[in-house]
């Protein structure tokens, strides 16, 4: 039983707020991106600064309560929350500083990628981020992080230069190649298992305008176009990025009303090379099959990053499954065709390229071990209406089960629901035992266990 005096002392120690179930804004504070998640924490500590994070860790530890950490709240299985426990909410911590001369940015954990884009784009700079500007920085980065710039500049973790971390005992330490390198190694792909990152330092790259946008073919062209794509993409220059998708055309701009509701396959482009060569890069996709729709052209990188924001606002129901893919076999293509009819208008399948610069880092150099995969696949059932949850969840699971035998056998940790320890072990492959040793050093009691958990070595 928690004593009122302990709660009072904790509340008074915070610069931020401690929200409890009786507070009028409790339901708003416990709402995350995936509305399918409905957890009821006992405490939500909205941290204003590092001192608040340290106080919250100490409170959770002293009281012996399950403790979750919330950054952007974008985690699919809802591991940013915990029933009956403490949520350390980092969302108020939005400090951000760009050093344009050094081409770096230092970011606090409440930032989303749209915040970083806004701050860096004025200098013509960007770093590797995902495909949605609403995504939070911490979970995306600590899981590995891939996106539009990945083929040219690697994963988010390949651009992470340093991190400040609050450990399970409340100590604040710095992690980089030079300081606590074992922790720095584990942070780059090992998720939130080792502590709470209160500051990320990223390398920036000269990225301003890109040639980008969607190109759709009729869904009937999936076999022809996917077979072309599997041969073309691995050989394409690294300044060419295009992820393959299956979807239903939304009734929204910039899509022509004539194709609203059409089932399609297609590519989402991001080209960072010389602008006068863009059309030559895109032409083979037009030649393999006649596009049903195309809206590809020059745009600022932040515009591309926020392209999906209106289609996928916070508060929809989500269920996703993923796998790494080395090769798109004929048998896999046949399964993609079989499941191409999405169950709801927002459900989709994406094949994200993770080759190019990603392959130039060894599998043991960071915790992310699948450096030989060519794609990271996600199958996402999405809808605003909970009545469709069973149908879209079944589609995602059946689709994944059909494709899993043709995969590399494991998934990107950020594309997993709560799927058990075997799947977590598989996600890290040969790096799992080393991660267990780092966990045992920095969090031997497994205080940080509300996550895709790595159990400490015994």
Image (spheres, helix red, strand yellow):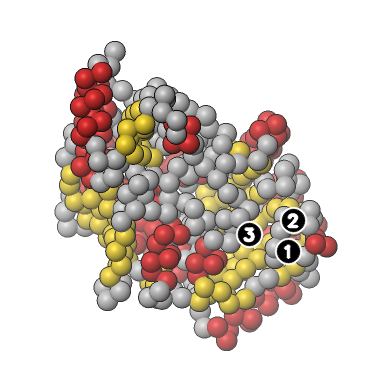
Mark 2 or 3 closer to N-term? 3
Q: Residue 40 location, x and y as percent?
A: 45, 26
Mark 1 or 3 closer to N-term? 3
Frontmost of labels 2 and 3 is 2
Looking at the image, residue 11 lies above or below residue 279: above
Query: 10 Å neighbourhood of mark 3: few (<14), some, or many (≥20)?
Result: many
Where does label 2 land, which residue? 251
Q: Is residue 204 left or right of residue 332?
A: left
Q: Is residue 199 left or right of residue 407?
A: left
Query: 10 Å neighbourhood of mark 2: few (<14), some, or many (≥20)?
Result: some
Q: Is residue 162 left or right of residue 210?
A: left
Residue at position x 42%, y 24% in the image: 22
The kind of secondary structure element at disc 2 is loop
Q: CA distance from mark 1 to mark 2?
A: 7 Å
Q: Residue 448 location, x and y as percent?
A: 31, 33
The kind of secondary structure element at disc 3 is strand
Where does label 1 land, which residue? 255
The kind of secondary structure element at disc 1 is loop
Note whether residue 61 is visible: no
Closer to the camera, 128 or 101? 101
Q: CA distance from mark 1 to mark 3?
A: 18 Å
Residue at position x 48%, y 32% in the image: 27
Where does label 3 land, which residue? 244
Residue at position x 48%, y 28% in the image: 39
């Amino acid at each position: 039983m928690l004593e009122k005096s302990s709660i009072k002392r904790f509340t008074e120690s915070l610069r931020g707020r401690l929200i409890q179930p009786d507070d009028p804004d409790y339901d708003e504070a416990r709402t995350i991106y995936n509305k399918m998640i409905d957890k009821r924490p006992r405490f939500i500590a909205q941290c204003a600064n590092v001192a608040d994070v340290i106080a919250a860790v100490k409170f959770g530890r002293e009281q012996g309560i399950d403790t979750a950490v919330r950054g952007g709240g974008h985690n699919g299985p809802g591991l940013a929350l915990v029933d009956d426990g403490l949520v350390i909410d980092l969302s108020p911590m939005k400090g951000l500083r760009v050093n344009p001369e050094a081409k770096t940015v230092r970011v606090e954990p409440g930032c989303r990628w749209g915040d970083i884009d806004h701050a860096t784009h004025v200098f013509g700079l960007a770093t590797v981020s995902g495909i949605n500007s609403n995504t939070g920085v911490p979970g995306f980065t600590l899981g590995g992080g891939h996106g539009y710039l990945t083929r040219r500049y690697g994963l988010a973790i390949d651009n992470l230069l340093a991190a400040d971390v609050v450990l399970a005992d409340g100590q604040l330490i710095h992690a980089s190649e030079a300081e606590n390198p074992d922790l720095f190694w584990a942070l780059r792909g090992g998720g939130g298992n080792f502590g709470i990152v209160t500051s990320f330092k990223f390398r920036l790259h000269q990225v301003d305008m890109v040639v980008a946008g969607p190109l759709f073919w009729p869904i009937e062209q999936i076999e022809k176009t996917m077979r072309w794509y599997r041969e073309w993409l691995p050989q394409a220059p690294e300044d060419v990025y295009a992820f393959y998708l299956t979807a239903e055309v939304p009734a929204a701009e910039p899509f022509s009303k004539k194709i609203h509701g059409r089932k399609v396959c297609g590519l989402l482009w991001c080209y960072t090379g010389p602008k006068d060569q863009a059309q030559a890069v895109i032409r083979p996709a037009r030649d393999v099959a006649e596009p049903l729709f195309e809206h590809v052209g020059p745009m600022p990188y932040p515009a591309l990053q926020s392209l999906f924001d209106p289609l996928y606002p916070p508060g929809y129901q989500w269920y996703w499954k993923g796998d790494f893919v080395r090769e798109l076999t004929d048998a896999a293509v046949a399964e993609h065709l079989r499941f191409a009819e999405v169950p709801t208008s927002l459900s989709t399948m994406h094949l994200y390229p993770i080759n190019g610069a990603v392959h130039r880092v060894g599998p043991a150099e960071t915790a992310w071990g699948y450096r030989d995969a060519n794609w990271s696949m996600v199958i996402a059932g999405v809808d605003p209406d909970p009545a469709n949850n069973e149908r879209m969840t079944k589609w995602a699971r059946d689709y994944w089960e059909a494709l899993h035998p043709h995969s590399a056998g494991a998934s990107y940790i950020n594309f997993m629901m709560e799927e058990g320890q075997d799947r977590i072990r598989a996600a890290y492959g040969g790096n799992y035992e080393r991660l267990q040793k780092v966990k045992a050093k920095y969090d031997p009691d497994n205080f940080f266990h509300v996550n895709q958990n790595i159990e400490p070595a015994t």
